[in-house]
Image: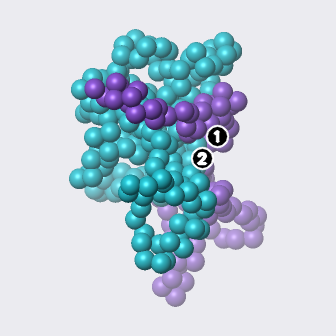
Amino acid sequence: MNPPLGRCYWAVAPFSPEPPFRVYAEGAQPIAVDSAHAMQVAAARGGSEFTVLTPVKVRPVLVVSDELGPYGEVLALRLRRFDKLTVEQASKVREHSDNGLFYLEPDSMPGLEAENSAIITSLLKLPVGALDTTAELGQVNENELRVIHERIADAHKLRLDLPILERAQALMAQIAARDPDS
Amino acid sequence: MSYDTAKIRIMEIETAGSDSVRIPTPREGVATHVRRYSEDRAVIVHPADFARLEMLDNLLTELATPAPFVLSEAAEAAHLDSVTPGEPVTDPDELRRLFA
């Protein structure tokens, strides 16, 4: 696995903009817009790009995808520190019995201050420039990453039936080509 | 949105009594096309081969069906906290100090 895939880094992670949207106005107070519809009305009047003031949090994340082609973007999961879990919840996560929180083995994460888990449903799309790649905080292995991908697909109910069927068909065609009598 | 697994399943299965049709003896590993007017009317396969096809059919259906995903209380709270902004630092003096 080539970096940044499977690694934890500090990142500048934005929160999603939500109403009221605070639209930046040069030299003036931001304009509060109370709904997406009001934004659409403004767009219909001729301007569709604005600067919305959105809070960010500098936090560790786990990168779960390769860079997407030429765009320099990755998918990453936010983390949950164990000091925010009860003893019972923490124990369930350590035993990999909580689908929503993937346990990050402390030995593999020497750069994280506390025991942590990756929040499967808290998925971010980030430019690589938003990651502090000067220091890796730790790394999951290939098998752990596979489980994380499976859980993300399950959580988001991603339709994987066609890729699975196509892969199966391609494999069958390969086998048939190798052994025409089969 | 839920999966329509019926659309993924390849075959529905029906049964006919052996006295109601006249069929050649099926051989394992061989599929016999029954043709009429140059068109396939049926394909006869050995029960062992059919069992294998049925198993593959079930396997594909199983693969294409997502496992139920239920968020625990801890995971729900973690998600909610992770997407809820806290109090951002906005004090200019404090910001100057932090980014000096």
Residue A106: x %, y % from top left: 44, 13
Residue that appears at 27% across and 23% down: A135
Q: Which chain is purple?
A: B
The mark lying in front, picked from 2 and 1, is 1
Q: Which chain is cyan?
A: A
**Chain under disc 2:** B
**In this view of the protein, can residue A6 be seen by the observer?**
no
Residue that appears at 42% across and 72% down: A47
Residue that appears at 36% across and 51% down: A171
Q: Which mark is residue B69?
A: 1
Q: Residues within 10 Å of mark 2 (few under 14, many from 20)?
A: many
Depth order, front residue of A157/A16:
A16
Q: Is residue B48 above or below residue A62?
A: below
Left or right placement of residue A111 versus residue B12 in this view: left
Separation of marks 2 and 1 at Cα, in angstroms: 8 Å
Left or right placement of residue A133 versus residue B12 in this view: left
Q: Is residue A126 above or below residue B16?
A: above
Residue for badge 2: B66
Residue at the bottom extreme, as displayed: B37
* SS type, badge 1: loop
Q: Amino acid at mark 1?
A: Phe
Quarter-of-image position of residue A163: bottom left
Depth order, front residue of B68/A122:
A122
Q: Are marks 2 and 1 in contact (CB under 8 Å)?
A: yes
**Chain under disc 1:** B
Instruction: Quarter of the image for the N terminus of chain A: give it.
Output: top left
Residue A145: x %, y % from top left: 42, 32
